[in-house]
Image: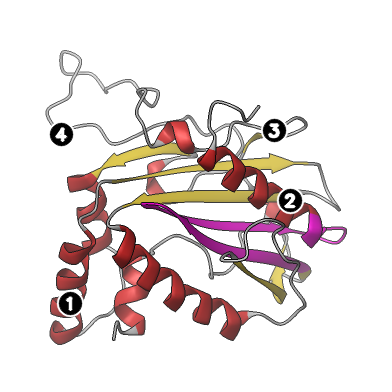
Amino acid sequence: MVSAAVAVVVLAGGGVAAAAALADADRTAPTRYWVAEDHTTGGTAAPVPSVPPNELTGKLMPLPANYWPGPDLDPEGNDYFLPSDKALQSFKDARTGLSSTERAERDKALADLKLAGMAGRSYARGEGHGAAVAEIRLIQADPQQLARFAEFTKKLIELTAGGEAPQVDGYPQAKCGLDDSLKGGKDGKEKIEALDCVAVEGNVLVTFRMYGSKGFAAKDAASLFKQQLDHLKSPGESA
């Protein structure tokens, strides 16, 4: 059985964590992806490139109406793609406090995943009360292994959920959990709610988190997650 420590590392950054303060979200952060260390421009700082076209980022839902690019998703930016080798290294570099035994278990689990790549994008809407940020990450790997990690993640979501989460219409395998116990804002006292979801479609695992201040609608968040799953199944038909 996969340990909690291993599952968290493999799904690093996919949600089930403290929500960022909406008031401090950096919506001007440039889109970027990993660049090789020898990428230079004559001794000057390398320009931040846009994400090149690839199969996995094509599976990410485009910005819906009334949304704009959200804050950064960890060091990779707010819209990124990591090829298999870089995605694998990012998981191994995650700060987890694992013991040597747990690290060995993690490395074996990562090898079994047959990781093909990872992509992520953030979305933001609204201002002040009612504002919200959504984070979507896709992991492309062996379908059977992804199914195992998805089941473990569903259990983690159940452990952290404190409110009633909506169902995702048309996707009975999807799981969502509502955490209504978070605090955020400039003073750290503002009530923040977050909806965490996970689903597997073929060889792609989707982790979703949407969080917001007072006025956040979990049903709207579940609807956005459904849009991502619809786009994943038929990317050419999604707006």
Between residues 2 and 186, which one lies in front from this camera angle?
2
Q: Using a 10 Å C-alpha cutoff, classify the residue at mark 1 as few (fewer than 14 neighbours), some (14 to 19) or many (20 or more).
A: some
Disc 1 residue type? Arg
Disc 2 target residue: 223
Distance between the alpha carbons at the discs numbered 3 and 4:
34 Å
Please identify, in this view, whether the residue under mark 3 or under mark 2 is nearer the observer: 2
* 156 up-or-down from 138: above or below: below
Disc 2 residue type? Ser
Please identify, in this view, whether the residue under mark 1 or under mark 4 is nearer the observer: 1
Specify whether 45 is left or right of 17.
left
Q: Earlier in the sequence, mark 2 or mark 1?
A: 1
Q: Which mark is residue 64?
A: 3
Tell me the SS state at disc 3.
Answer: loop
Disc 4 target residue: 37
Distance between the alpha carbons at the discs numbered 1 and 3:
39 Å
Kindly check if marks 1 and 4 are in contact, taking CB atoms under 8 A apart as contact. Answer: no
Disc 1 target residue: 103
Distance between the alpha carbons at the discs numbered 3 and 2:
12 Å
Disc 4 residue type? Glu
Kindly check if marks 2 and 4 are in contact, taking CB atoms under 8 A apart as contact. Answer: no
Distance between the alpha carbons at the discs numbered 2 and 4:
40 Å
Q: Which mark is residue 52?
A: none
Distance between the alpha carbons at the discs numbered 1 and 4:
26 Å
Disc 3 residue type? Pro
Distance between the alpha carbons at the discs numbered 2 and 1:
37 Å
Q: Residue at x 36, y 73 (%)?
A: 148
Q: Percent position (x, y) of residue 128?
A: 83, 48
Tell me the SS state at disc 4.
Answer: loop
Q: Quadrant of residue 18?
A: bottom right
Q: Using a 10 Å C-alpha cutoff, classify the residue at mark 4 as few (fewer than 14 neighbours), some (14 to 19) or many (20 or more).
A: few
Q: Residue at x 54, y 35 (%)?
A: 234
